[in-house]
Image (cartoon, rainbow, N blue to C red):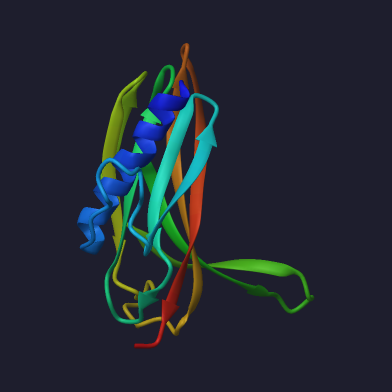
């Protein structure tokens, strides 16, 4: 992917994200909304970009726009979306606990093609209870196809939920 195409992808992802957070980047400057961050994840045959905010209010719905571009083959996803909480287990080692499995609308990006989708979380756990203010990991899995070979790729971000 050329630097121009990569820059265009970043701007398109920021523009898409700005529609979700209610701000608009300054056109022509390449600037992104101040409160939106685009987190790239390089995959073997392309890239995934997740647009997040610095923090979200506890009790509000978190929507994360996703931009997917395959440089060869296809990237489909997200095929699985999970929210995890991190901590320390009883033996003192780091541990991750599943908080919620999310429904995700999968899209397929073919070589050179930008596809967008999003995933939303209402801030509740699997039992439907509101989670406490804290940092949570959003982990997304993607199906990769390149020259007939199938594999999976992963992208993730940290979502900070703050008390209102």
Q: Report the front residue among 138 and 116.
A: 116
Q: Report the front residue among 37 and 120.
A: 37
Tag count in the figure?
0
Q: Position of residue 67 (x, y in %)?
A: 34, 40
Q: Is residue 103 visible in the rendered structure shown here?
A: no
Pick out the residue farthest to the top.
147
Pick out the residue farthest to the bottom.
164
Pick out the residue farthest to the front.
29
Q: Position of residue 29 (x, y in %)?
A: 33, 44
Q: Residue at x 43, y 68 (%)?
A: 54
Q: Residue at x 43, y 21 (%)?
A: 71
Q: Say above or below: 49 vs 37.
A: above
Q: Report the front residue among 32 and 62.
A: 32
Q: Say above or below: 63 vs 117.
A: below
Q: Position of residue 73 (x, y in %)?
A: 41, 17
Q: Is residue 38 visible in the rendered structure shown here?
A: yes
Q: Position of residue 83 (x, y in %)?
A: 45, 63
Q: Report the front residue among 30 and 129.
A: 30
Q: Residue at x 20, y 63 (%)?
A: 22
Image quadrant holding the C terminus, namely bottom left
Q: Quadrant of residue 113?
A: top left
Q: Say above or below: 97 vs 7.
A: below
Q: Residue at x 35, y 52 (%)?
A: 32
């Amino acid at each position: 992917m050329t630097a121009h195409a990569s820059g265009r992808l970043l701007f398109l992802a920021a523009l898409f994200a700005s529609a979700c957070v209610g701000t608009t980047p300054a056109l022509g400057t390449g600037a992104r909304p101040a409160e939106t961050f685009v987190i790239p994840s390089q995959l073997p045959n392309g890239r995934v970009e997740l647009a997040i905010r610095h923090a979200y209010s506890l009790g509000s719905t978190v929507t994360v726009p996703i931009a997917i571009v395959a440089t060869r083959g296809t990237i489909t996803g997200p095929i699985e979306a999970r929210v995890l909480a991190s901590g320390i287990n009883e033996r003192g080692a780091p541990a991750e606990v599943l908080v919620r499995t999310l429904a995700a609308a999968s899209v397929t990006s073919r070589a050179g093609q930008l596809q967008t989708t999003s995933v939303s979380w209402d801030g509740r756990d699997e039992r439907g209870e509101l989670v406490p203010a804290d940092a949570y990991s959003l982990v997304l899995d993607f199906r990769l196809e390149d020259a007939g070979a199938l594999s999976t790729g992963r992208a993730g971000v940290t979502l900070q939920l703050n008390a209102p």
